[in-house]
Amino acid sequence: MSSTAIPTPPKKTNRIGLEPQVYRGSKTTLCAGCGHNAISERIIDAFYEMGVDPRRVAKLSGIGCSSKSPAYFLGSSHGFNAVHGRMPSVATGALLANRELLGIGVSGDGDTGAIGIGQFVHLMRRNLPLIYIIEDNGCYGLTKGQFSPTADVGSRLKNGVVNDLPPIDTCALAIELGATFVARSFSGDKKQLLAILKAAVAHRGTSMIDVLSPCVTFNDHEGSTKSYAYVKDHDEPLGSLNFVPFFEDISVEYEAGTTTEVTLHDGSRLLLHKLDGKYDPTNKFEALRVLHETGARGEFATGLLYIEANKPDFIAMLNIVDEPLATLPLEKLRPPKAALDEIMEALT
Amino acid sequence: MATDLQVAPESEVPADQRIVNDFSIQVATVNGSGSQTANLVLLRSIFQMGIPVSGKNLFPSNIAGLPTWYTIRASRHGYIARKKEIDFLVAMNPETAREDVLSLEPGRAVVYDEPLKLNALRDDLIFYPVPFDKLVGEVTRDAKLRRLVRNMIYDGVLAALLNIDLQQMERALGRQLARKAKALVLNQGALELGFKYVDEHLEKRDPFWLEPMNETAGRLLIEGNAAAALGCMMAGVTVLAWYPITPSSSLCETLIDYLRKYRMDPETGKATFAAIQAEDEIAALGMVAGAGWAGARAMTSTSGPGISLMAEFTGLAYYAEIPAVIFDIQRVGPSTGLPTRTAQGDVAFCATLSHGDTKHLLLLPATVEECYTMAIEAFDLSERFQTPVFVLSDLDLGMNTWMARPLPYPERPLDRGKLLTEETLARMGEWGRYRDVDGDGIPYRTMPGQWGPGYFTRGSGHNAKAQYTERPDDYVHNLDRLARKFETARRHIPTPVVDIRDGAAIGIIAYGSSHVAVEESRDQLANEAELQTSYLRLRAFPFTPELGAFIDRHERVYVMEQNRDAQMQRLMRQELDAERSAKLRSVLHYNGLPVDARSVTDAVLVQEGLKAEAPPESPHGDVVSMVGGE
Ligand SMILES: Cc1ncc(C[n+]2csc(CCOP(=O)(O)OP(=O)(O)O)c2C)c(N)n1
Ligand code: SF4
């Protein structure tokens, strides 16, 4: 070998020696500009930076555009795209079967707040160690735009129908139900979302993260040249059924303690209020107060809303052996013959 | 103790006219009156006398206050199916006493609560009045206790009238109330009082008589659900998720009791299982699916309404190929139906549960022993074939007390099915979760967090590499492989039990809890009408070649099932050719009561033209005017 060979520059790796590429998944099939894609990107960054072994990760989801996204990160992990709204039970079974898994569940606001609200409620009660992300766009994306239970009062469907039911605040609900890590963020706020995700990886217990995640099918308000209706009307060759508009990702950066306004693709506005350093996330009443107050102002409080670090998680409560149940050997699973004899004796 | 009381009752019936060890006793009480202890003590003492016996609880969907009946059948021939006729009635419930007495056939005996004055109703029965309230006053003054021990008095009365060894009864009572010393003393007092009352005030005039035999040695008494629970434990269940529903709750509850006792790791004191009461049946099966996917041996138990809720996840488990064991302890439907009555009404629904083209493996236990062995088999099959397996038991089998041989210790190791190894991966070339490497339709799987490549599990269209696809050829390829897998399963599921009688023109097919009635009916057909029959007992779905061969051997084949629509026969007709289908006839029983031999025999005789059609609803028919529950 020649001594003059130029050494190849060391590849960028994380603390367990893996390259960023390992954390990527397959190419997204979601609309360009969909907030869900930005969330996938942050999950990739967070797991890379935290040095999580993807083989240890179980990705779970329900049904919806949001629930497709586990295919777009951590391609080498096992994933499970279950049925609509019922991912929490599947995640529960999987994590009980193998307590060494790091579970990440991705759901939508429809998936969680409507068909899945029952399972969501019980998941929060149980404090299963799982990162539970709601990709919250206030609508049903995959079934083309109906209202979801997190849609704001006054928001409009494409056909002009106005939502007049109050939204469910999944964060307030989760806190009320005993969840031990509750946060809200915005898909375009790279820094905040990444920090929250990294904290969630470190938390033992349910980490419920509601991420406001704009859907480009919102983009149909009148007068906008970027609106769904406008582009559709001016783009003859595309059939209306297959038509999907293209938009840039929305990104936003703002200081802790401040409020910022984000304009979505449809021209509607989100008011985000970032919690500041003085906020105490261990105070449940404070968290609920902030949620109610900001809500009343039409703002979304973002950041880590509530954390309870020392509550035993569901697996600890069940007092299960340390090794995964899935791989216990026969000797641990089948009681000896003497045990059966004893039972038979008692029944004669 | 009471041994000095043990004197054979005086009897007017000469020994050669006695009916020995071959009759039924029915106790009519009020739900929630604590009669269960008295009834089980009665059952157990007959069992301890070596007499084959079975007990059936006919109870309303209600916690307290409604009528309930307990029927015990003693049979020296070993018949343990329900017997339609009641020979010996204990009428403790004023609400039903009149009707109960009117439904008896002449010559039967009635023990009754004296103030009910039932003897005025008929003069063709033998009546034994007993002043229960007066007697119980001698046992205790406490009103609450009086209510509880009152029933034990009828055990004492029956011991004296039927010649049950009082020592056996005390032994049975001791087992039943092992840890309740005070209750034991009170109940013993009640037993003795009942016994003494007969001795001093009554004269035995009925022919029913119990004599010790030696037919129950080495046997045990157990409920089907308890046997299934033991099977699950021995099968190495690691995750169980359930939601309460009658008649399946006792399966998971018993299982959890056993697991807590026998499946705590001796070194750490920690559980080698996880048991969860889910928020509903949807969640229960979701947890099972998640756990099965991640490599646990996972199960749930439920009944009809829960099965309905499980349809979506069952389809997912079928299509995504995830093992899951589902016990369906069937009760009467449709809808809430009769929650505490028995049926085989979920057969067709379970066979194809969920939308699209789905089909499932069904196991059909007929005895408590099979509840146990098939529980073990269900876990092996579901992992081997990576698919849901339904065990279709029913209320009769699951919640009633049956005699059984000691359950055998399983010698076979667990069959964990096709887990990917390095060799297989090499043989496969490129990894494909749904690749048919061996031509049997069964792919290789890996489990999250363990060795082997990851993949994305989904209920939407996927190809051999588990990638999303909507390509028509991929879909067809995958669906055909699933069908091939199902064909392979045909060769691994339990085969029918066949008993061919030489020269028999007639065959009978049955499954599940109908079995014991059919066995008895075959003897009745042979003895009463010289009609020899062959018998095939189905033990699983899909069907195996034995079915066609059996039909070919016989001119007519009766399919006995406990549902209105001949569901199993419908499944058979889907697979059989026209010639075989044409031979099938139905015997159906679906009034919510466990099927009895007489009903089967009569139905066959009528269809064979050997008996006239029964007149509509005779007054001596079954008790059917139950007060409803939900
Ligand atoms: C049982 C059932 N009902 C309805 C559907 C149809 N469906 C698919 S996705 C969806 C809504 C998804 O909305 P959301 O969870 O908000 O996710 P998004 O697509 O907006 O990301 C519905 C209703 C289904 N798949 N299953
Ligand atoms: S429809 Fe909306 S939610 Fe679905 S992918 Fe497109 S932008 Fe995202």
Image (spheres, rainbow, N blue to C red):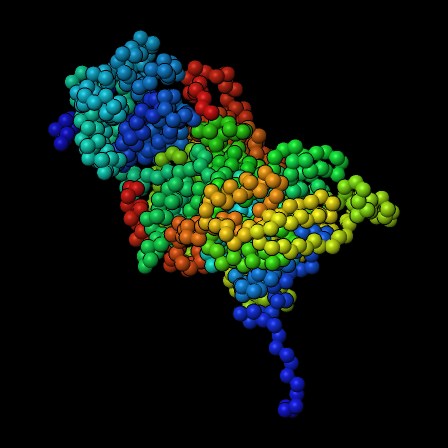
* Image coordinates for residue B470, horizontal then vertical, percent: 72, 51
**Left/right of residue B63 with respect to residue B451 in the rendered view:** left
Vertical placement of residue B95 versus B462, above or below: above
On screen, residue A322 above or below A265: below
Tell me residue B613's x, y (percent). Answer: 52, 19
Decide which of B418, A170 is in the foreground and name it.
Answer: A170
Q: Looking at the image, is B125 positioned above or below residue A93?
A: above
Report the residue at 61% width, 72% height from top: A12
Q: How many marks?
A: 0
Q: Nearer the viewer, residue A26 or A157?
A: A157
Residue A268 position within the rendered picture, expressed as x and y whole percent measured from the top left = 71, 43
Q: Residue at x 86, y 46 (%)?
A: A234
Q: Residue at x 32, y 57 (%)?
A: B266
Residue B59 showing in the rendered view: yes
- Quadrant of residue B207 in the image? top left
Can residue B237 be seen in this snapshot? no
